[in-house]
Image (spheres, helix red, strand yellow):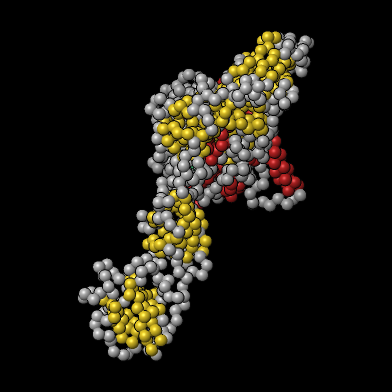
Amino acid sequence: MHGSVTTEAQRSLRRLLAVLAAASLLVTGLFATGGASPAQAAAAGPKDTIAVLFSYTWNQIAKECESTLGPAGYGYVQTSPPQEHVRGSQWWTYYQPVSYKLETRMGTEAEFTSMVQRCKDAGVGVIVDAVINHMSGKSEGGTGWAGTPFQHYDYPGLYSSSDFHNCRKDITNYQDRYDVQNCNLVNLSDLDTSSDHVQQTIADYLNRFVDMGVAGFRIDAVKHIAAQDMAGIWNRVRKKDSLYVVQEVIRANEPVQPEEYISIGDVHEFGFARKLKEAFGGSRIDWLISGAGIGGSWEGFLKQEDAAVFVDNHDTERNQETLSYKDGKSYDLAQAFTLAWPYGSPSVHSGYAFSDKDAGPALDGQGRVIDPAPGQNGWTFKHAQNDIQNMVGFRVATYGTAVANQWSSPDGSAMAFSRGDKGFIALNNGNGQVQREFTTSLPDGKYYNVITAKRTGGTWSGDTVTVAGGKFTATVSAKTALALHAGAKVESCVDVSAPSTPAAVSAKVDGGSLAVSWQASSDDCGVSGYDVVRTGGSGGAVTKTVTGTTLTDKTFSAATAYTYTVTARDASGKSSAASAPATVTTPEAPVVTGTSVYYKAPSGWSKAYMHYRSGTGAWTTAPGTEMAPVAGLAGWFSATVDAADGAALTAAFNNGGGTWDNNGDKNYAIPAGPEWSVSERKVVAGTPDKPVVTGSSVYYQAPAGWTKAYLHYRVGTAAWTTAPGVEMTPVEGIPGWFKASIEAPAGTATTAAFNNGAGAWDNNGGNNYAIPTGPAWSVSGGSVNAGAPQKPVAPKPLAGKLDLFYKTGPGWSTANAHYQVGAGAWTAAPGIAMAAVSSCVSGNGWYRLTIDSGTAANVTVAFNNGAGAWDNNGGKNYTFTTDVAAVSAGKVTTADPCGVIS
Ligand code: ARE
C-alpha cells in the first residue's frame, strides 16, 4: 500500500498553475511591482535530473552532453561558476568573483557559448552556478584569472566600496539574521544586494546567460542574500518563467530558512542527503520508504514541488555531512534510490577523487583545467557510470507514476518498490544476498536489469528477468540493486504457439514441505510461468503460479493424498495442456511444530536475534529472526519459529550489532516442543518464571511553580521510561503533591527523577531517588519516606489542651517536655516525660504528650533527654498556639505526624 507521495506530475502541474497565476495577474494589471514576483521556475518534467560536472572544462561538458548526458536522459548539466575568479590552485578559487568576464580556468567565453549550444542540441540545458552574494575574499587584493586588478571592496568598472555591506567582518553568528546577510562569508566581500545598482548589475550578469540560451541557475550562498533582495534581482531577469532555478540554502536550526526562497524556485533539501547518509551509511534503509516515505510529508522537509535533492555536493563530499564517492557501493545505492524515488529534482554530483579537501583539479602549465577523461587524474565519471546513467533513464520512464508494492526485508537492509506500471527497483544494502519472489505492477514481459545491463544507442544487452502475473524471482547480491523499467524491455517476439506440456512432474514429502518439480516447457517466445493446480484434502482445488520449475508447498493436512498437475503459460497468455498428475500422501504426524524460544540476553543487549536452523535445514540469514522483548521480564526476549517434523533447532543468539552468544561455539540445541527457555547457557523446558510484581504509589511534592509533574524511572536495571516519563496526577486536597503508580518485582528498587515536562528536573542533585517496593512512598524536600502524604488539617487555636509531638534527634532514648502554660510557672526541670509513639505513619522516633492548657492562648516548651541534652529552639524556646503541634529537627508543624489522634 503506498502512501500519498506527490508525483512529479502534480509537481509540474503546480508549477504550471503558478506560472499561469503570475501571467493572469499581469494581464489583469494587479501585479504589484516592488514585491516578490510570484513567478515560479520552469516546470520539472520527466527529464529533471541535473548532472553536476564539478570543475569540468566547458569543452568536456559539451562532449559529455553529446556522448552521455543527452542519450541517458539527463535534462540538465550544471557547470562550476563561469566568471573571472582569483588565481590559485585550489578548486574554490572560482567562488571568488573578480569580474563578470566569462574567462576562467575551465574555459573561455567562446567555449562557454559553444557548450551551451552543443548541450542544447543534445537535449541538455545548461545550469549556471551563479556566485552573486559576494566578490573575492582576498583582503590584500590582487589580479584575477583574466588579468583584472582588484581590491577587496573595489572591482574597477563593476563595484566600488559603496556597493558592499558595511559590516565588513566575518559572519560569526548564524543565529543572527543580520550577521548572516550583511557580514562576510569567510572573508568574501559581501555585496549590498539591497541596492538598485547592485541588483541591476547582478541581473545584467544573469541576463547575459539567458540571452545565450542557458536553462537556469544554481544560486550560490543565497542564504546570505535577504529573500527580498533576491526577489529584487530576480524580478529584473528576463524569461524567468522558463528558467529552472535551484538555490543553496543549507538547512540548519537558524533564523534564515529554505522556505523563504521558494517563490524564486527550488531549494536544495539538505535534510534528504543527511537521511540518506544515515540509512545507506548504516544498515537499515527500509524506513526511507515506509508510510509515505521520505519527502514532503516529513517534518522539516521542503514540499515536493519546492525541493531539489542530491546524495552529495562538492561541499558535503568534503565535509562528510553526506555520503560521497568514498563510500563505494552504498553511495551508488543511495544514488539509485534518489533517482528512483519521486521526491524533488535530483542532482548527480560528478567530480574527482581527493585526499586534500582544498586540492583543485589537475591543471596544465598555464593553470587551466585539463579536460577530464575517465580513469585519469582521479575523475570519478559518476554521471556516466553504467548503473547511474541507466537510473536516469529509469527516472524518465517512470515519471509521474506513484510508488506502490513497497517491500522491505525483516532486517530492513533491503527494500523494493514499484513506480506505477512503469518501473520497479530492489535495493540491497545488506551484507548477504536477497533471493525472493518480488511483486511488481509491471506488465508481463522480459526486462533488462538496468543496473547491470548496458544500453548502446537504443539497444540493450545483459541480465534480464521475466515478469509474469506481477511476479518475478530474482537474486539481488549484497550491496547491489536490481531495476526494471518500461523503457528497457526485451522486444516481444511474435508468439505463434503455446508452450509444450510440462513433463516428468513429481511430488514428494521433503522435510516439512511437499516438493513438486517438473521439466521446463519450451515456447517460441519463452515460458513466462507455470500454474500448478493441487487437488485433494479439504481445501479443494488450489492454483499456485510460479516462474521456476519447482514449487514448495507448506500448507497441507496430515495423512492426506494430494495430486498436482502443471500447465505452462507464455507471455501472451497461451497455455499448454495440463501435465500428467503426480500424487503424494502426507505422513501421519503434523509435520511442522511451533517452538517458542525464550532467551535471557546478556546485559546491555537492547535487541536479540535468533539465528537458527531446523534439523538439517538451511540456516536463517544472519542475524536471523528478531525476537520480541517479553513484557514484565527484563532482559528476556522470545520468538516462535517452525521446527520441521519435530526436529530439534540449532540456534545461536546475537544482538543484531555483531555480538553473538553461540554457547561457546557449540550453538544451542533446542528440542522440539512448545516452549524452551535459554538462560546462562542452559536450555530448560517451559517459559521463564515471571517475578511477583507489586504495585507502589509514588507521591511527590513538586517545587513551587510546577503545574505538572512527570516521573521518569527505571525498575531495577530495566530500561528507563522515555523522557519526560509518565505524567503524575495531582493529589486531591494536597496542593503541590502529585501521584503515580509503578510496578516492580518484590525487592527491586526503582530509580527515579522528577520533572515538570518543560525541562525543569529534580534528580536529587544528580543522585536520582531510590524508591523501595512497598505500598506507598512520598518524596519531598530531597527525602523518600514511607507512606502517603497527609491531608493538611487547618490548625485550630489552643483550647483547653495541647497535643504535642516531638521527634528526637540521634542519641536520645527518652524525651521530656519542660514547659510553661501562658505566663504561668515552668515545670521543674527536666519537665514531664513524653510517651514514645509505637507506630507512626511518618516513621519512628516520635514522642507524645498532652498538656492541659486551661484558658491560656499559648504554651512555651523546651525539650530534653533527661541526661543534659536540650533542644530549646536555639535559646528561643518553642511557643505553641494551636491545639496540635509537632516538632522535628527544629521545624514546627500543626498536624498529627503519626495518625494517632482519633
Ligand atoms: C576559501 C577559504 C577560506 C577563505 C576564503 C576567502 O577556504 O578560508 O576565507 O576562501 O579567501 C567555497 C569553499 C570555501 C572557500 C570559498 C571561496 O567552500 O572554503 O573559502 O569557496 O573560495 C556556508 C554558506 C554556504 C556555503 C558554505 C561553504 O551558507 O552557502 O558555507 N556554500 C557555497 C558553496 C561553497 C563556496 C561558497 C558558498 C562561497 O557551495 O563551495 O565556498 O561562494 C552551517 C551553516 C551553513 C554554512 C556552513 C559552513 O552549516 O548553516 O549556512 O554554509 O555551516 O560554514
Report the quarter where the N terminus lies.
Answer: top right
Asked whether residue 874 appears in the rendered view, the answer is no
Q: Nearer the viewer, residue 481 or 210?
A: 481
Residue located 75% across and 13% down the image: 578
Residue 138 location (% of width, % of height): 41, 40
Report the label total.
0
Measured along the vertical axis of the image, is residue 739 above or below residue 131? below
Q: Quadrant of the C terminus?
A: bottom left
Q: Is residue 773 visible?
A: yes
Determine whether 481 is above or below 583 in the image: below
Query: Which residue is painted at 25% across and 85% down in the image?
Result: 828
x, y percent for residue 174: 46, 49
- In the rendered image, residue 551, in percent from the top left (x then y), is placed at 65, 19
Compared to 231, does 537 lie above or below?
above
Q: Nearer the viewer, residue 701 or 446?
A: 701
Drawn side of residue 719 relative to residue 198, left or right: left
Residue 436 sits in quarter: top right
Q: Is 791 placed left or right of 865 in the picture?
A: right
Residue extending furthest left? 868
Q: How far across and how far down the image is residue 462, in percent?
A: 61, 15
Q: Horizontal placement of 506 versus 102: left or right? A: right
Q: Nearer the viewer, residue 255 or 587?
A: 587
Q: Nearer the viewer, residue 187 or 245?
A: 245
Give above or below for 855 relative to 471.
Answer: below
Q: In the image as oriented, which residue stretches furthest toward the front?
A: 588
Residue 441 picture quarter: top right
- Quadrant of residue 90 in the image? top left
Say which residue appears at 48% left-offset and 55% top-offset: 695
Q: Say which residue appears at 56% left-offset and 30% top-offset.
A: 594
